[in-house]
Image (tube, grey):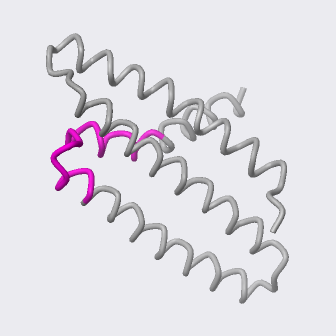
Amino acid sequence: MKVDATVKKETIYIASWCAVLSLLMQAVFLILKYWDCTVLLGNLWGYIGAVANFFLMGLTVQKAVTKTEEEARKTIKLSHTLRSMFILIVAVIGVSVPVFNMWAAIIPLLFPRIAILFRSFSLKK
């Protein structure tokens, strides 16, 4: 399946915001003197999981718009369930694997929501 330009554009927007927020988080860990390599690795793990989740959501929406209303509803519901399990697996691995800082792996999973919040503020203007 060819990735729609809108899905690419929005994923790049989310990835950019997540990168900025990740840098801010790294700075906070550094300022608080809790930074070590596990923070960086955990941040990368969470960042990849968050952006991948958003991209998969975009692909699902792209596929759903070509279906009937009932098929689209089922597709979106299944995608939501699978992506929730994916995020849970990313979080569990981020918490249980010692190479990742637990907080640095989990916090980036929230970054797309923050990016979407900023997008909604900018669209209202």
Q: Please tell me in which quadrant of the rendered image residue 64 appears.
A: bottom right
Q: Does the magenta stretch include residue 110?
A: yes
Number of callouts in the render?
A: 0
Give the x, y percent position of residue 30. Answer: 24, 14
* Quadrant where the image shows the N terminus: bottom right
Give the x, y percent position of residue 100. Answer: 23, 42
Q: What stretch is highlighted in magenta?
A: 93-111
**Side of 124 where 116 appears, left or right:** left
Residue at image position (50%, 23%) is: 20
Residue at image position (83%, 56%) is: 4
Q: Is residue 116 magenta?
A: no
**Side of 82 where 41 appears, left or right:** left
Taking the view exactly as shown, the residue that stands out farthest to the bottom is 70
Quick check: 61 above or below 25?
Answer: below
Q: Main secondary structure of the magenta part?
A: helix
**Side of 38 where 73 appears, left or right:** right
* Quadrant where the image shows the C terminus: top right
Q: Which residue occupies the foreground of this view, 56 or 72?
A: 56
Give the x, y percent position of residue 24. Answer: 39, 20
Residue at image position (57%, 53%) is: 54
**Side of 16 where 114 appears, left or right:** left
Q: Please tell me in which quadrant of the rendered image residue 73 appears.
A: bottom right
Q: Please tell me in which quadrant of the rendered image residue 46 appears.
A: top left
Q: Which residue occupies the foreground of this view, 125 or 111?
A: 111
Quick check: 102 above or below 49?
Answer: above
Give the x, y percent position of residue 113. Answer: 48, 44
Residue at image position (60%, 39%) is: 14
Quick check: 4 above or below 12?
Answer: below
